[in-house]
Image (tube, rainbow, N blue to C red):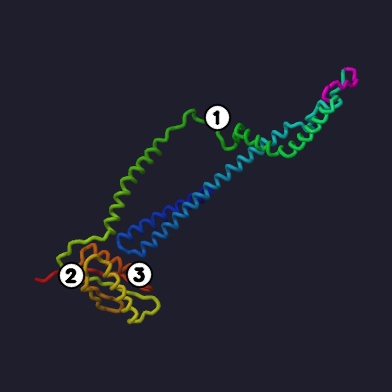
Amino acid sequence: MKAIRLVGYTFGGLSAAYAGYYTVLYLTRWEWQRALISAALLIVVEVFLATVLLLTRLSRLEDRLEQSDARVEEVRKRLEQTRDPVPNRFNWLRSGDLTDVNGSRTFVFVPVLMVAGAALSGVAMVLQKVAGATARPGAERRLAGRLAALTAPPAAGTAALEDQPAVPPARTGRRAIAVVAAVAGLVLVPLLWSALADATQTRAEKAPDAASTTMVFRVETRGDQSPQAVQLAAQDLWETCRRSTASENGDATLNRMDAGVYTGVVRPALPSHDVMRLRGCIEDANTNRTSAVVLGEGQAERRG
């Protein structure tokens, strides 16, 4: 069982790290559709790990409850063993106890000679019988539950008292590892957060000293693969992605080079951050039943 849990935790942890890494990677590349898919996978893995952890804790609680019930039942059985097999709570009414040394019956107990005492004794006997028949199991179980804490623990799986150290050994290694992990987390989390925010924020940059930015990419469609369908998909993808940049790109043309290969030219040239956003949008290809791959990019220098 422990091996299965270890395999589950290992698989879930590696899957979460894998999905988290690609979520951050796709965000920095401005590939939003892939980032959403990776983030959804990360959430699914986290729910899986939380479910496994809760099931493990519930299983431990169930085992503890079963062990506690077993100990309570054992104590209750011991209480039953100490009970008189033939209970008689009004021993003074037995005739054998009311004889003297010579064997003659004395009947000198005053309440027996009184009608009121006999009536009260009868009522008390009835009440005692009713109370004993109704409250005995619950009372004994509650008493056994209280006494279970005073019982000795089970001997199976426990070391002898003389074999246990008087003072538990100091776990300096675990404490050092925990401190190092906490310090590393406090340092790395702000750095990663700042790097991710810097890579995904929209900001205006200084335009490069170039005439235009050229991007060559290949477009493939699923289903209808006719030249007209591919041309329409490429045009739709280009018009969508060129508007994802922060710079003004009113002069943006798309030219067909080969079967499925197109060249997009933006004038004036885009800054490096906008080039990254444009490339990420094209490769993300959020157009229906369309995929694209960037083959190359470059900038044309100004003449004169």
- Image x and y of residue 300, in percent: 17, 70
Question: Magenta part of the protein: which range?
Answer: 101-111
| Front residue of this view, candidates 158 and 192 | 192
Q: Kindly identify which numbered label has been placed on residue 268.
A: 2
Image coordinates for residue 244, horizontal then vertical, percent: 28, 67
Could you give the CA–CA distance between mark 3 and mark 2, rounded to whole angstroms?
26 Å
Residue located at (34% from left, 75% from top): 220
Q: Magenta span has 103? A: yes
User: Is 183 above or below relative to 96?
Assistant: below
On the image, the x and y values in percent for residue 79 come to: 70, 33
The earlier-in-sequence mark between 3 and 2 is 2
- From the image, state whether disc 1 or disc 2 is nearer to you: 2
Task: Sort mark 2 into few (<14), some (14-19) or many (20+) by Cα contacts within 10 Å.
Answer: many
Q: In front of the other: label 3 or label 1?
A: 3
Taking the image as shown, residue 295 lies to the left or right of residue 209, namely: right
Check disc 3 and report the residue beneath it. Answer: 286
Main SS, magenta residues:
loop
Please report whichever mark, 1 or 2, sits nearer to the chain's N-terminal start.
1
> Neighbour class for label 1 at 10 Å: few (<14), some, many (≥20)?
few
Residue 242 screen position, x and y as percent: 26, 70
**Measured Cα–Cα span from mark 1 to mark 2:** 83 Å
